[in-house]
Image (spheres, rainbow, N blue to C red):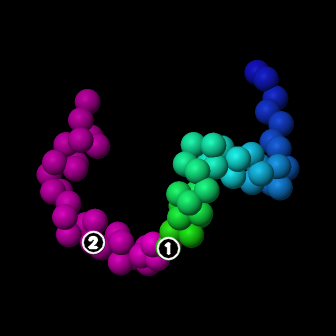
Amino acid sequence: MKKSVLMEEEKLVEVAIEALLDRLGPVETNRFLTLPRKKRMESVKRHRQWQQQLDKDAFFNKIFAQ
């Protein structure tokens, strides 16, 4: 197995910005970098919301199917 060497964070940011600029141009790169972040939903609330939409029988059939 080949050992991976991670680049330093400053270099990573530099390379990523260059890639964005090359692909998107300066205006879209700036727009991408300043997009507002969605606020994370609290995990219990997210889980309850998921449970409300869950079809229990279909879920169990999928999990325990052989």
- Secondary structure beneath dot 2 equals helix
Q: Which residue is mark 1?
A: 36
Magenta segment: does it hold 59? yes
Residue numbers of the magenta segment: 37-66
Dividing the picture into quadrants, the one containing residue 26 is bottom right
Q: Is residue 66 above or below residue 16?
A: above
Q: The disc labelled 1 sits on which kind of residue? A: Pro
Residue 14 image offset from top left, x and y in percent: 77, 51
The answer to whether 6 appears left or right of 56 in the picture is: right
Residue at (28% x, 65% y) in the render? 50
Residue at (24% x, 41% y) in the render? 62
Mark identifier at residue 6: none
Q: Is residue 11 above or below residue 54?
A: above
Q: Nearer the viewer, residue 36 or 42?
A: 36
Residue 10 image offset from top left, x and y in percent: 83, 55
Q: Dominant secondary structure of the magenta stretch?
A: helix
Within 10 Å of disc 2 (Cα), the crowding (few <14, some 14-19, many 20+) is few
Q: Which residue is mark 2?
A: 49
Q: CA distance from mark 1 to mark 2?
A: 24 Å
Q: The disc labelled 2 sits on which kind of residue? A: Gln
